[in-house]
Structures are given as C-alpha cells and as structure tokens.
Amino acid sequence: MQSMKGIFIFFHTILFAAACSSPVFADVTVERYTKFGGFSGVGASKFYEKDFIKGLKKNTESKKKFTGKFLGKMVGEKKSSTIYRVDRDLIWNINHKKKSYTERPISMPERTESRRELEEKRKGAGEDAGAREAEKREEPETRIIKNEFNIKETGAKKTLNGFPCKQYIVTWLLVTENIKTGARNKSLMTTELWNTPENEKIKRLLKEEGTFNSAYLKKLGMDISPGDMKKLGLNMIGGLAGGSGTDVKKEFAKIKGYPIATSVKWESSGDKEPEEKDESGGGLDLSKGLGGMLGRLAKKAVKSRSKKSEGETKVVFESYTEIKSINITELPNGLFEIPGGYTKAKSMMERLKEK
C-alpha cells in the first residue's frame, strides 16, 4: 500500500509542479486547507497550513486534527510551526506550547566508507546481479488488460475564495489480470481540478515557491530545477500510464491555469483470489515489471474483501486541498527567527544517539 501511495502522491505532485523559477524575490503568504480520508480510512485527518516565503526562508504554520474514531480520540488536534532556513542550512521545529525548539540541518551528512566496506559492496553487487538476472527470466504473474489516461475540460465554472475557476477531470484507469487464475483487479484514480487563470499574483507565487523549492532540493543533494522535475515526472507518468512523456505532455497541455481546489480519489475493485503467501516483504517489487507491481498492489487493496463484497468498489485513498488565500506583501524578518525566550531542546535523533 505504501508503494502505491508513493506513486500516486508523486503523480499528484508533478501534476501541479511549478514550471519556472526566478531570482527576483517577493514575499508570499499562501493559506491551504486539506482534508485527507486516510488509506482505507486509516489516518483520516484535516489540517490548515499557512506558508510564509521570503527568498530562501520559509515558515510553515499548521493545525492538524485527526478525524478517525481511534486517532481522533487519542491524538486530537496538533499545532506546529516549522522554519526552513535554506540560507543557513537549518530547520527549526517550534513548540509554542513548551516555548522550545529543535534544530537540525537540511543537508544530509556525508558518509565516508572504508576500502573494506567498498570491496564488500562490490562483491555483494556481483552476487546480487546474478540473482536479479534469474528473477528477470521468471514468467510474469500479472498482465495489463487496460491502461488509460485522460484529461477533460468539462466547461463547468465557479468562483472559489475570490478566484474564478474552470473544472478539469483527470482519470487514470488500470485493469490487471492474474495470468494463472484469470482474476482481475481495477484501479481508478480520479483527480478533479478547479483552476484559475495565472494572474500576476499566481505567477509571483509560482516563481517564489519554485525558487525556494529548487534551493531546498539542492541542499538535499538534488540539483534539479522545477522545470526539469516536471519533465522527469511527465516521463515517469508516461511510462506508468502506458505512453511516453510526450504523450502525457500533450494531455497535460489541455490544463490551463493554477489549481485552487484539487480532489483526488483512488478506487479499487476486483475478483476474490485464493489466499497466497506474500513473500514480497511489503516493498516495491519491480522484478516482474509494471503489470506485476500494480497488480500486486491492487490485489492487496482488495484482499480483505469477503465473498459478499466481491466486485464492489473500495475507496483506498481520498483527499481534498483548497487554497484559501494568496497574499503578496512584505514579511517581517522576525517571522523566520526563533521567538525570544524559547529554549533549545534535543531532537529525537539526538536522543537516540545518546542511548
């Protein structure tokens, strides 16, 4: 489930990737509301986020509330504030309730390996290559019956939070079949967009978010521009959707404007199969190709069905995100500093190192 979650979240991210960046800074404040249905209901929550961006500085204030029966009672509402200082390679997690903060670097620490460790890795890589080659020769368990990706402008219009919007519907349908049993599984991901024209305010937001995100990724060791990230994502989506990056780019060209509201729903249904021992370890199995990977994940999503519910559609993932406001105005530098009187606390990583 986590594997499919990663695929669809990546798809969702690329769908709205910034197409450009600019060295010209302007302070931006954007407020978002998100409602998350959880995965098969687990982890359902809703939260508000307000991002303050000033050049290579960012402060994210969030308020999250779990809405599920169990976590809703156990955890309730959580408030947090995180300050990202790309210019200083630091992240501060602020705890206003305790008037404390933790600190950690953005960039990952470099790891030096001994010659012996490198030799062992080379030896292991040679042995693994033989095993992987043997796996490749195995017959696939699943085949793709249908793989369709479409984008449609519906013509519907409405105004959201002062933004005039048009509706787009993006669908990705995938049907797989177990070669041995003939059992089929269907996955349908539907994304509904309400997009507004890119006025000067939207363009400024895209530029500032793009500039900050590029610098942040560079600190993480990924020196890639938003434009290159979008191109990479389109190529990946093209491969998953049975086409090419060029094909997907043509479909995405139908979408105009910037998303003010976005809803995503992933539904799954399928035939009941005999219980099989899962030897995948829960990881992402790419050894049998895309059909085998998605077929296995879809099968896991409906594995718990009883005979009575066989063939029924199950909502595996559902979310809704809406931009409440966008403001272009100068922000005070103090918003990106540790509040006065707050004391430094040990982070979880620091506490683990002490044990």
Image (cartoon, grey):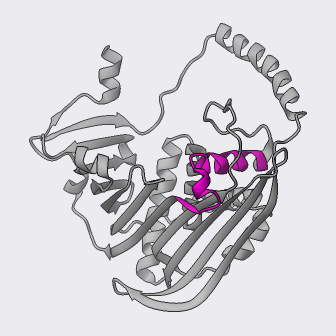
Q: In the image, what residue occupies the spot 22% across and 56% down?
A: 335
Q: In the image, what residue occupies the spot 67% across and 56% down?
A: 270
Give the camera-side residue of 91 and 190: 190
Q: Which quadrant: the C terminus?
A: top left
12 lies above or below 138? below
Question: Is 242 on the left-hand or right-hand side of 167?
Answer: right
Question: Is 56 on the left-hand or right-hand side of 121?
Answer: left
Give the camera-side residue of 68 and 258: 68
Q: Position of residue 76 (x, y in %)?
A: 23, 50
Q: In the image, what residue occupies the spot 69% across and 62% down?
A: 234
Question: Is 255 on the left-hand or right-hand side of 207?
Answer: right
User: Which residues fall within the magenta stretch?
Assistant: 291-315
Specify whether residue 162 is painted magenta: no
Direction front: furthest residue? 308
346 lies above or below 188? above
Specify whether residue 311 is painted magenta: yes
Direction left: furthest residue? 341
Question: Is 298 on the left-hand or right-hand side of 103?
Answer: right
Q: Position of residue 114 (x, y in %)?
A: 61, 11
Q: Quadrant of residue 100?
A: top left
Count of numbered badges drawn on the protein: 0
Magenta stretch, main secondary structure class: helix
184 lies above or below 2? below
Q: Position of residue 189 (x, y in %)?
A: 61, 65
Q: Which quadrant: the N terminus?
A: top right
Q: Position of residue 103 (x, y in %)?
A: 29, 35
Give the camera-side residue of 190 and 211: 190
Give the camera-side residue of 215 and 166: 166
Q: In the image, what residue occupies the spot 64% across and 71% down?
A: 171
